[in-house]
Image (cartoon, grey):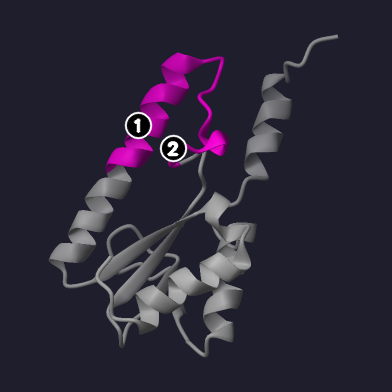
Amino acid sequence: MTDRLSPAERSAHMRLIRKRDTSPELAVRRVAHALGLRFRLHRHGLPGTPDLVFPRLRKAILVHGCFWHQHKGCRLARQPKSRLDYWLPKLAGNVARDRKSRRALKMAGWTSLVIWECETRDLARLRATLQRFLLGGEDF
């Protein structure tokens, strides 16, 4: 028995992977809302279309999946084992685009924070991070 999926099965599986309203993003939204903060979602006019935008504070949060955005040192960011000619440039492109988006946000006068998928599992720590970023005035 093989673990390989047919092209049609792979395509169906990949269609199920969402860009918005992912579990990590929903966790960040719940914590921010519990802190009494209100925000806008997926602001298209900003570089990188941040997941959560706090216009009054001029702060933006990007919630990244560890695999898709290659979180350094994270076990969830493992390298694919097949089709490396496709995956390696794709993942490297994601990382380069993320870097460019954050730089453009900074140039536009916005402060941004990346929350990684693995960081959303510890809600107390996530809450502390969001409090520091959004209410503490610390520069990230």
Label 1, label 2: how many angstroms apart (C-alpha)? 8 Å
> Between disc 1 and disc 2, whose residue precedes?
2
Q: Looking at the figure, which quarter contains the C terminus?
A: bottom left
Marks 1 and 2 close (CB-CB < 8 Å): yes
Callout 1: helix, strand or loop?
A: helix
Residue 80 lies within the magenta run = yes
Q: Looking at the figure, which quarter contains the N terminus?
A: top right
Residue bearing the label numbered 2: 70
Residue 58: where, in percent of width, then height? Answer: 27, 79
Return the residue found at the far right. Answer: 1
Residue 108's image quarter? bottom left
Callout 2: helix, strand or loop?
A: loop
Of labels 1 and 2, the one closer to you: 2
Residue 4: where, in percent of width, then height? Answer: 72, 16
Residue 5: where, in percent of width, then height? Answer: 73, 20
The residue sitting at 37% across, 40% down in the picture is 94
Q: Is residue 41 visible?
A: no
Residue 97's image quarter? top left
Residue type at mark 2 is Gln
Q: Residues within 10 Å of mark 1 (few under 14, many from 20)?
A: some
Residue type at mark 1 is Ala
Residue 17: where, in percent of width, then height? Answer: 63, 45
Q: Residues within 10 Å of mark 2 (few under 14, many from 20)?
A: many
The residue sitting at 56% across, 35% down in the picture is 75
Q: Nearer the viewer, residue 112 or 39?
A: 112
Magenta part of the chain: 69-96
Q: Is residue 110 left or right of residue 1?
A: left
Residue 49 lies within the magenta run = no
Q: Nearer the viewer, residue 134 or 54?
A: 134
Residue 112 vs 18, above or below: the answer is below
Q: Is residue 2 visible?
A: yes
Residue bearing the label numbered 1: 92
